[in-house]
Image (tube, helix red, strand yellow):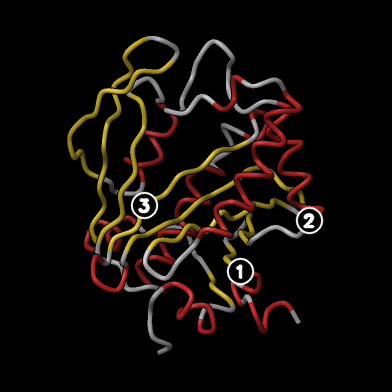
Amino acid sequence: MLTDHFPLVGLRLTTPRLELRLPAPEELAALADVAAEGVHDPAEMPFATPWTDLPPAERALRVIQGHWRQLGSNTLDDWRLPFAVLHEGVVIGQQNLGARQLAISREVSSYSWLGQRYQGKGFGTEMRAAVLHLAFEGLGAVSARSGAFETNLSSLAVSRKLGYEPDGTDRDVVRGAVSITRRLVLDRDGWERHRTVPVTVGGLAPCLPMLGLPIR
């Protein structure tokens, strides 16, 4: 079985409304379709790399290639988990969790997007809460980092709700203009105070060596 050689495909995160897992081929195709349909208002750009400016077919291909590229380039000291997010069996977006030298740094970072028609329903908070639970409870992290352009009010609202604190700013050039990124950080105490979403993690133990951690 594939899980014998690549146990990450057996990792599951479940919340009251969502399931997060590495997508099967058909689910990856569905994720690409969601991206092709639209992720945000075309007048705005929430990403430092403006991949959503691509035509729909190229946008879909970018999602598929990016997923394979991330998994194929993972090492014990530098990895990304590009989870597909499913609601009632339907793929609605992607939630990424990553870390560098996690066994030493004990720090993770996250990145996510939702199909535009699935936004405004609280899914963004729930899917981020799922990977934060994995990070702090399952992987022993002590901090988690995120960030968003100051114009991305929905992402910033999710971070505030989950307990992130300001950690400075960066200046990026996007679409030929300056965009200010607000860096955010969440420590274990902040996570404990704001953890309101129940999360269940399945299939983690055999994945730990692939993430640079010992099996507990």
Q: Position of residue 130 (x, y in %)?
A: 49, 59
- Distance between mark 1 and mark 3 Cα atoms: 19 Å
Q: Which mark is residue 93?
A: none
Q: Secondary structure at mark 3?
A: strand
Sequence-wise, which precedes: disc 2 or disc 3?
2
Q: Which mark is residue 12?
A: 1
Q: CA distance from mark 2 to mark 3?
A: 25 Å
Quarter of the image where one finds residue 71 = bottom right
Q: Residues within 10 Å of mark 1 (few under 14, many from 20)?
A: some
Residue at (35% x, 26% y) in the render: 149
Q: Give the mark toward the camera: 2 or 1.
A: 2
Q: Position of residue 197 (x, y in %)?
A: 47, 58
**Mark closer to the observer (1, 3):** 3
Horizontal and vertical percent position of residue 24: 75, 60
Secondary structure at numbered mark 2: helix
Which comes sooner in the sequence, label 1 or label 3? 1
* 100 lies left or right of 91: left
Residue placed at 42% from the left, 49% from the top?
A: 110
Disc 3 residue crowd, few under 14, some 14–19, many 20+, Cα 10 Å: many
Disc 2 marks which residue?
25
> Which residue appears at 27% of the width and 67% of the height?
106
Q: Which residue was labeled with disc 3? A: 109
